[in-house]
Amino acid sequence: MTSPKPGSTIGRVAAPITGAAARRAEISRATKETEIALRLDLDGSGKSRISTGIGFLDHMLESFSRHGAFDLDLEVKGDLHVDMHHTVEDSGIALGSAFRAALTGEAGAFAGIRRFGHFYVPMDETLSRAAVDLCNRPYLIWKVRLERPKLGEMDTELFKEWFHAFAMNSGGCVHVETLYGENTHHIVESCFKALARALRMAVEREDRLTGAVSTKGVL
């Protein structure tokens, strides 16, 4: 499991829970490699302000926010003079942690939501799908082949690192697969959009079942 690096701090300030829970979270994370400030509202309208210092990652997270209908403010100051790895991974850690925090309320972790979500996203010649289970048992299946080593200045191997960090820290079982595709930009973008749409489905409030959607009674 991806965990905070030595010397890091993770904090959360959740919105007050009165009546229908406001599913929001704030994350502050500081290490010797990155400083991150993040605000997330799961019941937003897809508004975002993203600044990671990596243009393509900003583009992907703006798309993630829009298609998930999540309001997301994220500022990352990372050691980009070294490379992009720490900034990419730590942004996934912070966003995953925010999802977990926003879904943990008085009713218990991941209670009152649909829990499962899935979505297919076609982009020209590419088709990708994501399936998620917000079950507090994190896992990542990544069946995505990227032929080009870089998109702009970004190493394409870092995308798996972001998805892994997100899954491990959100508590979600995340499966992402590109069924076919050629254009690397389309492949990566379709994966982010598919994950966003699958999460949008999974975090929807469940009106017919109470508590955690599990025969265990708790997740």
Image (tube, rainbow, N blue to C red):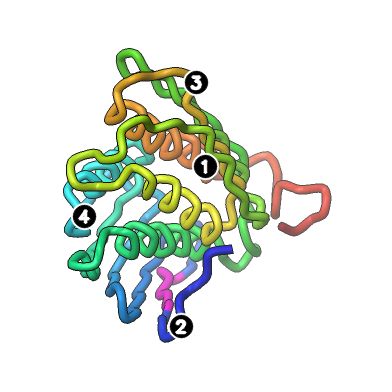
Comes first in the chain, label 1 or label 4: 4
Q: Which residue is mark 1?
A: 204
Q: Amino acid at mark 4?
A: Ile
How far from the left and from the top, in percent, is residue 88? 33, 57
Of badges 2 and 1, nearer the viewer stands 2
Secondary structure of the residue carrying numbered label 4: strand
Secondary structure of the residue carrying numbered label 1: loop
The one nearer the camera, 47 or 132, is 132
Of badges 4 and 2, nearer the viewer stands 2
Q: Which residue is mark 2?
A: 6
Q: Amino acid at mark 3?
A: Leu
- Asked if residue 12 lies in the magenta stretch, the reply is yes
Q: Which mark is residue 50?
A: 4
**Label 4, residues with CA under 10 Å away: few <14, some 14-19, many ≥20:** many
How far from the left and from the top, in percent, is residue 53? 17, 58
Comes first in the chain, label 2 or label 1: 2
Comes first in the chain, label 3 or label 4: 4
